[in-house]
Amino acid sequence: MEKIILAILVGGSFGFILHKVGATNPNKIVGFLRLTDLHLAKVILFAIGFSSLLLFILMAVGVISPMHISVKASYAGVIVGGAIFGIGFGLGGYCPGTTLAALGSGRKDSIFMILGGLVGAWAYVLAYGWLTESMPWLFDKIAGGNVSLAVTGNESYPALIDGMPGIVVAGVIALLFMGGAFLLPNKFRSN
Amino acid sequence: MSSSWGWLKSGTILGLSFLLAVALVKPIGVSTQYVIADCFIFCKLKPDLAQEHVDADGNKSYSSSNAYLNKNNGKYAKSTLNIANYGFIFVLAMFAGGFLASKLGGPKVGKEETWIPQVWKDNLGSSWIKRMIGAFASGFFILFGARMAGGCTSGHMMSGMMQTSLSGYIFAAGVFAIAVPLAIILFKK
């Protein structure tokens, strides 16, 4: 029950925030992708850098347990799947999550995005067995699979840069992201 | 659009929301829940897609006749049969969050934009059917790709890169390598 209440609170806040930052607006997503309005690029760069810095600081001082870390696997399909994702992202201007909050905010074309998403996800579920047999290279691990760049303290996930404390590696990356957000202009192209 | 937040405030609060999710429960991930919703529908027609087994000691295990749903000891089958779980309630709450945000201070979606975003109208016309097909196709590619990649913007890009996960970086590389040129070609104004 406690988890359900958390889901409502965290999910609700997440939807609320996605709308307030402009991520539910396909005009903003397309503006970001065609480099004419980099608002969302600055938001995402800063959000990743800031949350990463806080996460590694809080893990270093023992407030957040490394057991909460969950590093996904790296394999060829992550890049290929990302590229297929990119086709839909560039075409529609929604993500799997932003489209849900967008529907809540009144963007009704999200209904078709979500329906297409349900069909696309099911198509992958049905194609999976065939893909593992006919294109096994898609599932070839990259750099060992479930790896991070910085040491997280969770031994399930080896770090690629393990000669120095995780907070140093993650801290440098985080500062680059946050600095990038400040340095990025509002647009690269005018129209 | 003045009711939207500026980029620094946006980035700070969005970052805190991802951090809060990790600190309280686990990293945010949305695209998995499309599979769970599908499985919930289709296992009504084909019950062997999600099955629960109870052994003599009362221990539960899960399996599926589908190779994908059966992965990781039937993890998807388990989530489907226990659909009132964290992940699924989370995505339902996201609708409510978007609704509240548009009501409490906005920005509100203009009437002329409820079915077709302005940037689509400016470049691809005001045909409702065309946008409907475009949005459906977009959803198809996005979720097919996200399931192949094992995550989407929230799981790979935000939560992943926050943890310095290699997968987040390679996912982002794949996405932007295609999405940026495609958006530039499709949307010229």
Image: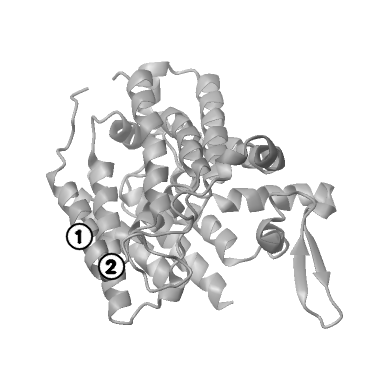
In percent of width and height, residue B94 lies at: 48, 55
Please report whichever mark, 2 or 1, sits nearer to the chain's N-terminal start. Answer: 2
As drawn, the residue found furthest toward the right would be B56
Left or right, residue B96 beside residue A183: right
The residue carrying mark 2 is A163
Q: Nearer the viewer, residue B178 or A10?
A: B178
Left or right, residue A32 beside residue B98: left
**Which residue is depicted at the point 37% across and 54% down?**
B158
Q: Chain of mark 2?
A: A
B117 relative to B24, above or below: above
Dot 1, how many residues are within 10 Å of its Cα: few (below 14), some (14-19), or many (20+)? few
As drawn, the residue found furthest toward the front would be A163
Q: Secondary structure at mark 2?
A: loop
Left or right, residue B86 beside residue A83: right
Dot 2, how many residues are within 10 Å of its Cα: few (below 14), some (14-19), or many (20+)? few
In percent of width and height, residue B167 lies at: 43, 51
In percent of width and height, residue B119 lies at: 35, 26
Which mark, by number, is residue B155?
A: none
A111 relative to B161, above or below: above
Q: Are marks 2 and 1 on the same chain?
A: yes
The residue carrying mark 1 is A172
Whether residue B98 is visible to the viewer of this picture, yes or no, is no
Q: Chain of mark 1?
A: A
Amino acid found under the numbered disc labelled 2: Gly
The C terminus of chain B is located in which quarter? top left
Whether residue B175 is visible to the viewer of this picture, yes or no, is yes
Left or right, residue B54 beside residue A71: right
